[in-house]
Each structure stands twice: as C-alpha cells, then as structure tokens.
Amino acid sequence: MLEFDNVEVFYGKVQALRGISLRVDEGEIVALLGNNGAGKSTTLSTASAIVRATSGTVTFDGADISKAHPWNVVGAGLIHVPEGRRIFSTLSVLENLQLGGYLVKERGVVAKRIEQVFELLPLLAERRAQHGGTLSGGEQQMLAIGRALVAGPKMLMLDEPSMGLAPLIVAQVMQVISDIRDQGTTVLLVEQNARAALKVTDRAYVIEEGATTLEGRASDLIADSRIIDAYLGA
Ligand code: ATP
C-alpha cells in the first residue's frame, strides 16, 4: 500500500534520509524504530509530501506520490498524526473532530464518522463539549487519533503516540491502534517505545542514521539480540 524505494531527503545541506526502503501492506501495523534523529519523523513527512525526496520514489495505493501535494496525499487517504498531537486547545472535542473532516464534502459523512469515533473512543463522547486543552495527555492523543479517523484514512501514520504518557495509558493507546487496524485501517507507527510498539505491530523496520538497516516480524525482532541491546534494554 505504501512503498519507499531508496529515498533520500536533505534539509538544506543536512542529509536526513540516506536510503529508506520499506513497504507497508494493506491491513498491517508496521513500526519504525530508531533513536532520536534517526530519520523516523522525516520518513513520515516525506510520505505526507510535507518534505520532498531528492531521490528515490514513494508510492501509495499504486500511485507515485513523490511529487504530490500534501492535500492530494490526504485526499488519497494517507493521514498523518504528527508528533506532539497539535489539537486545538480552545476548541471543543467535537469541533476538533469536525476539523478532521475539512476535506470531506458531505456533511453527513463527517457526522457519521464522528459517531464511529465516539464508539471506538467513548471517553471522547463523554467530553465532547470540553475544550481540547482541558484533556489529559492520553486523552489529547486519543483526540488527535480520532480527528485523523474523521478524515477517512486508508492508512494512518502515527508519530510517537506514546510520547510523555504513563505506561498504563501507553497500553491503552496501543490497544486503540490495534482496534483501528481490526476495523480495516492500515497503520504505520513511529515509536521510540519499542517494547510497547512491538506488542501490537506485525512487522518493524529499524532506521539508523537515515537508512533502513533491519526489517523483520515483530515476534522475531522482540527476541533479536540487536533489538534487545539497542532498543529494549535489560
Ligand atoms: P525524533 O524522534 O527526535 O523526532 P527522528 O528519528 O524522527 O527523531 P528526524 O526528526 O526525522 O528524526 O530527523 C532526522 C535528521 O534530520 C536529524 O539529524 C535532524 O536533526 C534533522 N532534521 C530534522 N528536521 C530538520 C529541519 N527542519 N531542518 C534541518 N534538519 C532537520
């Protein structure tokens, strides 16, 4: 569904990606693991066409999106939840969700998707009139995910959804990601919390210094000494 073939990206003179090759098949949850600055966020931004590849190709759903505009990528159903959530703190939960449907022409479709988000994430239904800024960190992450779902993704890209959350809340976020896949949405997940990510993912790639260096099934990687030493700790 999403494929990177030897993608390179520069920020000015700084080379952030030096050869990213990966694929995410329909129905999978795939994780990108790697240390700070390895190039995980840049990989997602390249898929969203926020950042341009200087070489290599990115395809989504059979189309080359290497030179697409970000709104075309959103329109094609590839939705990015960036790091840091970026919800609107002075708007209500409901208004934040409605903004997720800004490219959807039919109002009825947006309302129906918001009802589906409330079924998946009942805590958002309870807080629908509350300002986004009054939610806890975990609730804000759920709202950011819910807002992305209102856009009607074929594939959701989540950047560090566990950032700054307590372990119990991280487990809840990972469960929601698993539920989203079970409902038919493919997921590409960037995580520094490799332990939490590998519990819900099918496969993962390791990114080091801007290149994909290791790929495998999550069940194999969790027992791989290279992964244990570098990302899982004792
Ligand atoms: P993190 O988890 O810290 O976000 P990451 O793996 O997502 O790390 P990126 O944010 O993709 O890594 O960064 C990859 C490299 O590109 C790093 O060396 C970073 O310093 C550099 N970089 C990222 N954004 C920019 C930018 N806007 N301008 C210049 N360099 C950047």
Image (cartoon, rainbow, N blue to C red):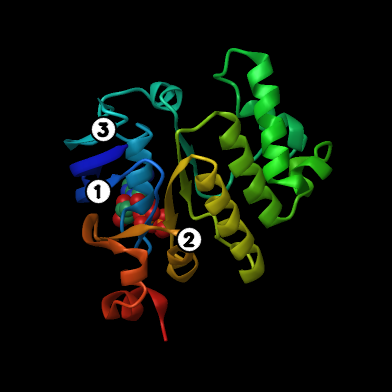
Quarter of the view holding residue 96? top right
Quarter of the view holding residue 126? top right
Left or right of 123, for residue 27: left
Residue sitting nearer the eye, 23 or 40: 23
From the image, tell me which residue sits under label 2: 200
Task: For marks 1 and 2, give the one nearer the viewer.
Answer: 2
Q: Residue at x 31, y 71 (%)?
A: 220
From the image, tell me which residue sits under label 3: 59
Is the residue marked by circle 2 packed among few (<14), some (14-19), or many (20+) residues within 10 Å? many
Question: What is the C-alpha distance between the residues marked 1 and 2?
Answer: 19 Å
Q: Secondary structure at mark 2?
A: helix
The quarter of the picture where the N terminus appears is: top left
Q: Residue at x 22, y 49 (%)?
A: 20
| Residue type, numbered disc 1 | Leu
Residue 94 picture location, percent across and down: 75, 32
Asked if residue 91 shows in the view, the reply is no
Question: What is the C-alpha distance between the residues marked 2 and 3?
Answer: 25 Å
Left or right of 144, for residue 122: right
Question: What is the C-alpha distance between the residues marked 3 and 1?
Answer: 11 Å
Is the residue marked by circle 3 packed among few (<14), some (14-19), or many (20+) residues within 10 Å? some
